[in-house]
Image (cartoon, helix red, strand yellow):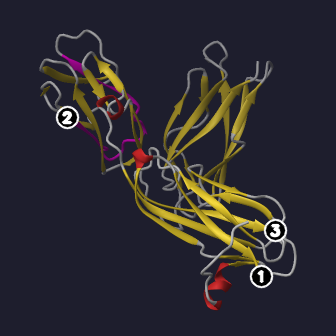
């Protein structure tokens, strides 16, 4: 066991005690600036059993997978000392951090130990910064760009980066899987060898538009036949702003299951809000249809039964959906899952 020195005075000690038995020398530690490249860092929190009874550590639980805690799980007799060693792994976690470890002892009392600091990012090579190959000599830092909910009348902007790893200058152009007038693009027309560039993608959603924004964005290099597309994901919605009185969609069941003899099923849509709930758009997978019209209104506090059909000849796979776009500002896009149990 460890002999402990310089324990806190009474006022501070009461804050560092667990159940009037284990007294920690300190409950927090600041690592300051640490190097990501240097790997994990550790600090030991020393304690002593100042009570008159045996205790043991029931559990010691870190708040994050980046943090671990090592300790002696045996009995701590009165007057004996010990320590809990907390280790933080900064890999892929640049910037400021603050984590904690929950310590609970055998009498069910508990205390938290805190670590903090700032991780200085390590230098990364080109292949780490740009791990995705779009075309020969052209690499990107992403393969997917997520826009989430983009409200009507608003603009949402996302960026990703490119680099020319070839030994020649390349001319660039772009295309999409299908035309979308709401998608705005800013991109360099060429890159010199070793040059990096930024692509700016922005969705500007016009009034009245709702629906899925999924698309493929392809950056092509002149003289190259193939190029890997970057996937764009998002939803055009009515609004993402509301109040306590706004419409609120709920439905039950959330999953409709179809067996061999069942051709249709039923879901109930509820408006738990005070304002009218409006069905702005409906999307379904192939082989699924719903008896619900675009523009349907459900009054505040009311509900509506909706029949859903499955055509097994057209249905592909084991799972599909009925996707609803509404004026619910909290959850403007909801899906009723359709499952084929054959």
Left-right relation of 109 to 172: right
Q: Earlier in the sequence, mark 2 or mark 3?
A: 3
Residue 30's spot in the image, x, y percent?
A: 48, 67
Residue 72 place in picture, x, y as percent: 75, 58
Q: Is residue 199 visible?
A: yes
Q: Which residues are magenta?
A: 198-221
> Residue 163, image x and y in percent?
23, 29
Q: What label does residue 197 carry, if any?
A: 2
Q: Quadrant of residue 88?
A: bottom right
Front disc: 3 or 1: 3
Label 1 belongs to which residue? 20
Q: Earlier in the sequence, mark 2 or mark 1?
A: 1
CA separation, marks 3 and 1? 14 Å
Q: CA distance from mark 2 to mark 3?
A: 60 Å
Judge whether residue 315 is colored magenta.
no
Q: Secondary structure at mark 1?
A: loop
Q: Residue at x 20, y 19 (%)?
A: 166
The residue indicated by pointer 3 is: 76
Q: SS for tag 3?
A: loop
Q: Position of residue 268 (x, y in %)?
A: 69, 45
| Side (left or right) of 6 relative to 177 | right
Task: Please name whichever residue, 21 or 167, is drawn nearer the observer in this view of the structure.
Answer: 21
10 Å crowding of disc 2: few (<14), some (14-19), many (20+): some
Quadrant location, the N terminus: bottom right
State the CA–CA distance, disc 2 to disc 1: 60 Å
On-image quarter of the C terminus: top right
**Label 1, residues with CA under 10 Å away: few <14, some 14-19, many ≥20:** some
Q: Is residue 335 left or right of residue 268?
A: left
First along the sequence among labels 3 and 1 = 1
């Amino acid at each position: 066991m460890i002999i402990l020195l310089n324990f806190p005075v009474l006022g501070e000690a009461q804050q560092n005690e667990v159940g009037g038995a284990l007294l920690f020398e300190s409950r927090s530690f600041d690592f300051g600036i640490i190097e990501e490249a240097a790997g994990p860092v550790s600090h030991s929190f020393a304690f002593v059993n100042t009570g008159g009874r045996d205790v043991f550590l029931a559990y010691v639980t870190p708040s994050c997978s980046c943090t671990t805690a090592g300790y002696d799980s045996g009995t701590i007799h009165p007057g004996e000392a010990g320590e809990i060693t907390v280790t933080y792994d900064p890999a892929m976690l640049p910037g400021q951090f603050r984590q904690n470890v929950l310590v609970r002892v055998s009498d069910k009392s508990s205390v938290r130990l805190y670590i903090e600091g700032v991780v200085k990012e390590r230098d990364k090579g080109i292949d780490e910064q740009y791990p995705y190959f779009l075309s020969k000599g052209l690499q990107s830092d992403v393969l997917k760009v997520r826009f989430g909910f983009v409200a009507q009348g608003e603009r949402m902007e996302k960026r990703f980066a490119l680099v020319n790893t070839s030994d020649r200058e390349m001319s660039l152009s772009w295309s999409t899987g299908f035309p979308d007038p709401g998608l705005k693009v800013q991109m360099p027309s060429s890159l010199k060898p070793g040059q990096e560039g930024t692509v700016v993608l922005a969705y500007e959603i016009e009034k009245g538009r709702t629906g899925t924004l999924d698309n493929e964005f392809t950056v092509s290099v002149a003289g190259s036949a193939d190029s890997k597309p970057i996937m764009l994901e998002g939803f055009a919605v009515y609004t993402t702003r509301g109040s306590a009185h706004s419409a609120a969609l709920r439905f039950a069941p959330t999953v409709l299951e179809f067996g061999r003899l069942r051709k249709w099923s039923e879901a109930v849509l509820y408006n738990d809000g005070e304002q009218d709930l409006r069905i702005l758009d409906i999307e379904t997978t192939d082989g699924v249809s719903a008896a619900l019209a675009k523009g349907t209104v459900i009054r505040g506090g009311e509900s509506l039964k909706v029949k859903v059909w499955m055509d097994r000849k057209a249905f592909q796979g084991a799972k599909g959906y009925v996707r609803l776009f509404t004026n619910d500002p909290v959850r403007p896009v909801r899906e009723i899952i359709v499952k084929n149990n054959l």
